[in-house]
Image (tube, grey):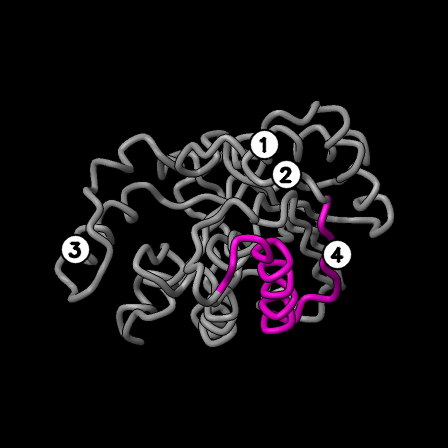
């Protein structure tokens, strides 16, 4: 049976970082995949020589289209809110806008972010709250909050610190970020789809170049063996489902 997944994100590139493998897997298995971004990412870091600030929003939306194609997504929607100010948008307004997409698509599954907004970015926290409200308005049956296993993230951060040219971040920076393993309901195996995920990461070229290269740049450049370890699984917390010792590898378990 085919299902429809709407994946809601704050900025272009978030979809590849947090859910790229899962969306590629869903599309490959015959499900409809729709990506919704709240903003155009125009406040993101940029190399002004290659990606002028004045055109960054349009550039990043085009990169999102390219990334979505790499993942096999069927539709991309931008809600058009200002990057860095999405947290200021009235909850009802944003929830109604997302709910309209959910109704159009007759969505079976909505992905958002965990209650921490991952690492606490205000726009990401807003995605969590807007997603929950929109799902209730539209009657979306399943809400899955994209997250990362905090324990594994801290371990991976230690590994990346010893790789040449890698991100220098203290593991303790993530001590309260994302989700504890005891809260996570789904651990999705995306290793067969890492090629698509990497292609989606690379598509966000404006975020992989320049002196202040962001996480997407480091992850897209990982050696294959390290990539399988760091990026080979994606995690979710399903609203209303109690976590168990055995995490689910089926995004649609509650619908079957």
Residue denoted by label 3: 161
Residue denoted by label 4: 4
Task: From the viewer's side, name the closer residue of 155 and 173.
Answer: 173
Tell me how many marks there are: 4
Nearer to us of marks 4 and 2 is: 2
Picture residue at 73% right of the left edge, 44% below the top: 79
Residue 14, horizontal then vertical, whole percent: 52, 52
Q: Is tag 3's residue or tag 1's residue first in the polypeptide sequence?
A: 1
Picture residue at 85% right of the left edge, 44% below the top: 103
Q: Are marks 1 and 4 in contact (CB under 8 Å)?
A: no
Element marked by disc 3: helix
Range shown magenta: 51-79
Task: From the viewer's side, name the closer residue of 157 and 3.
Answer: 157
Task: From the viewer's side, name the closer residue of 174 and 145.
Answer: 174
On screen, residue 172 versus residue 60, left or right, reads: left
Q: Are marks 3 and 1 in contact (CB under 8 Å)?
A: no
Nearer to us of marks 3 and 1 is: 1
Distance from Cα at disc 1 to Cα at disc 4: 29 Å
Distance from Cα at disc 1 to Cα at disc 2: 5 Å
Element marked by disc 4: strand
On screen, residue 236 versus residue 9, left or right, reads: left
Residue 147, horizontal then vertical, whole percent: 46, 43
Name the disc covering residue 189, or none.
none
Task: From the viewer's side, name the closer residue of 105 and 16.
Answer: 16
Residue denoted by label 2: 82
Distance from Cα at disc 4 to Cα at disc 3: 39 Å
């Amino acid at each position: 049976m085919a299902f429809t997944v709407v994946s809601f994100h704050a900025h272009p590139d978030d979809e590849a970082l947090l859910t790229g493998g899962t969306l590629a897997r869903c599309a490959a298995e015959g499900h409809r995949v729709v990506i919704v971004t709240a903003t155009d990412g125009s406040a993101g870091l940029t190399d002004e020589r290659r990606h002028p600030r004045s055109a960054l929003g349009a550039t990043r939306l085009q990169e999102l289209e390219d990334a979505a194609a790499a993942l096999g997504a069927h539709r991309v929607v931008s809600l058009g809110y200002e990057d860095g100010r999405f947290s200021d948008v009235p909850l009802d307004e944003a929830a109604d806008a997302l709910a309209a997409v959910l109704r159009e698509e007759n969505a079976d599954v909505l992905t958002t972010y965990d209650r921490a907004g991952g690492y606490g970015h205000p726009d990401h926290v807003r995605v969590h709250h807007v997603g929950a409200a929109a799902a209730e308005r539209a009657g979306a049956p399943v809400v899955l909050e994209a997250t990362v296993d905090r324990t594994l993230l801290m371990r991976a951060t230690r590994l990346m610190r010893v790789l040449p040219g890698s991100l220098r971040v203290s593991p303790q920076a993530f001590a309260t970020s994302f989700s504890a393993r005891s809260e996570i309901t789904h651990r999705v195996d995306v290793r067969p789809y890492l090629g698509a995920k990497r292609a989606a990461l690379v598509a966000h070229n404006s975020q992989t170049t320049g002196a202040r290269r962001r996480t997407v740049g480091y992850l897209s450049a990982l050696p294959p063996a390290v990539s399988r370890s760091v990026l080979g699984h994606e995690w979710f917390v399903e609203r209303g489902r109690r976590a168990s010792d055995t995490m689910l590898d089926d995004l649609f378990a509650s619908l079957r």
